[in-house]
């Protein structure tokens, strides 16, 4: 899944003097406060960390309540979704107007009806709401389905994603993985049609140019013949 990345950061953790005898615990507590919140510094939501304290020495900072500054290096796992990235999430709710999903157990996503391609038809089967493909009856989206969708936008404050199922390579992740050839061909059809149309247009343009040039060529031939006749008479 896209949107996940690793980052190495050089950090300084500020600890209260009361943590002087348990520095490691203090560092872990401070780093834990970063989890599942968006950080502008790292441009992402911190999901995990692996700290490596560079020195056992801590610098005492002056002030009314002096703190200990501990330098360390940490590996961070970040969640940083951007527009047009492919994400996967578990569907938790379906209605005629939208599909709701949860990504990585903490971030919510909603796909509005205008972002669900026409291929999917809303139905209620056995009292349960479901979206079924009009072309492939086994391609279904229901509660519990892992869906693959494109990111439209990401609200960093509430960790909410607006998604899209317009592209043919989005939908039920399991169906897409087991029917790779089918949807790949469907995805290539519009491109093939576009290439064919462009080729046909170029052919038409060439013929129009050729037809436009032909009269002038014929005219030039007539002028040459007239000049030749005049010379013969003279």
Image (tube, helix red, strand yellow):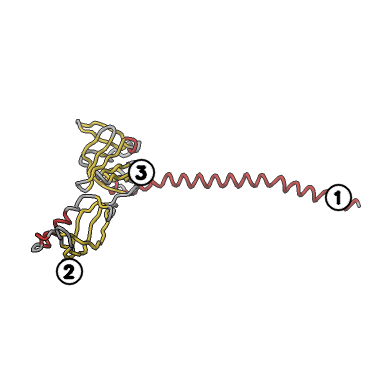
Q: Is residue 68 left or right of residue 229?
A: left
Whether residue 145 is visible here, answered yes or no, is: no
Q: From the top left corner, tell me how far across and down residue 198 is, in percent.
A: 51, 46
Of 38 and 70, nearer the camera is 70
Q: From the top left corner, tell me how far across and down residue 143 is, in percent.
A: 21, 39
Secondary structure under tag 1 reads helix
Q: Is residue 96 left or right of residue 201?
A: left
**Residue at x 12%, y 62% (from the top left corner):** 24
* Rendered image quadrant of residue 168: top left
Of 37 and 118, nearer the camera is 37
Disc 2 versus disc 3: nearer the observer: 2
Of 159 and 169, nearer the camera is 159
Tell me the residue that label 2 is attached to: 55
**Circle 1 residues within 10 Å: few <14, some 14–19, many ≥20:** few
Looking at the image, tell me whether mark 1 or mark 2 is earlier in sequence order. 2
* Rendered image quadrant of residue 21: bottom left
Disc 1 versus disc 2: nearer the observer: 2
Whether residue 91 is visible here, answered yes or no, is: yes
Tell me the residue that label 3 is attached to: 167
In the rendered structure, find residue 205 and report the number of the disc placed on it: none
Secondary structure under tag 2 reads loop
Q: From the top left corner, tell me how far across and down residue 164 is, in percent.
A: 32, 42
Looking at the image, tell me whether mark 2 or mark 3 is earlier in sequence order. 2
Secondary structure under tag 3 reads loop
Tell me the residue that label 1 is attached to: 229
Disc 3 versus disc 1: nearer the observer: 3
**Residue at x 78%, y 47% (from the top left corner):** 222
Q: From the top left corner, tell me how far across and down residue 176 is, in percent.
A: 29, 46
Disc 1/disc 2 C-alpha distance (Å)? 104 Å
Looking at the image, tell me whether mark 3 or mark 1 is earlier in sequence order. 3
């Amino acid at each position: 899944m896209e949107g996940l990345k690793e980052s190495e950061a050089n950090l300084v953790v500020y600890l209260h003097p009361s943590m002087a005898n348990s520095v490691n615990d203090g560092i872990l507590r401070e780093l834990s406060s970063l989890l599942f919140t968006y950080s502008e510094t790292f441009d992402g939501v911190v999901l995990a960390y692996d700290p490596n304290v560079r020195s056992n020495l801590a610098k005492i900072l002056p002030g009314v309540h002096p703190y200990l500054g501990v330098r360390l290096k940490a590996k961070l796992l970040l969640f940083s979704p951007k527009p047009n990235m492919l994400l996967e999430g578990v569907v938790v709710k379906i209605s005629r107007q939208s599909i709701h999903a949860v990504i990585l157990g903490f971030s919510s996503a909603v796909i509005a009806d205008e972002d669900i391609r026409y291929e999917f038809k809303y139905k209620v089967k056995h009292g349960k709401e479901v979206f079924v493909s009009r072309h492939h009856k086994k391609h279904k989206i229901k509660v519990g389905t892992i869906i693959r969708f494109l990111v439209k936008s990401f609200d960093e404050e509430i960790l909410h994603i607006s998604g899209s199922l317009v592209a043919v390579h989005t939908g039920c992740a399991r169906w897409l993985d087991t029917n790779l050839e089918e949807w790949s061909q469907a995805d290539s059809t519009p491109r093939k049609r576009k290439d064919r149309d462009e080729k046909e247009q170029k052919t038409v343009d060439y013929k129009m140019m050729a037809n436009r040039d032909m009269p002038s060529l014929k005219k030039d031939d007539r002028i040459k013949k007239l000049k030749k006749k005049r010379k013969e008479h003279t």
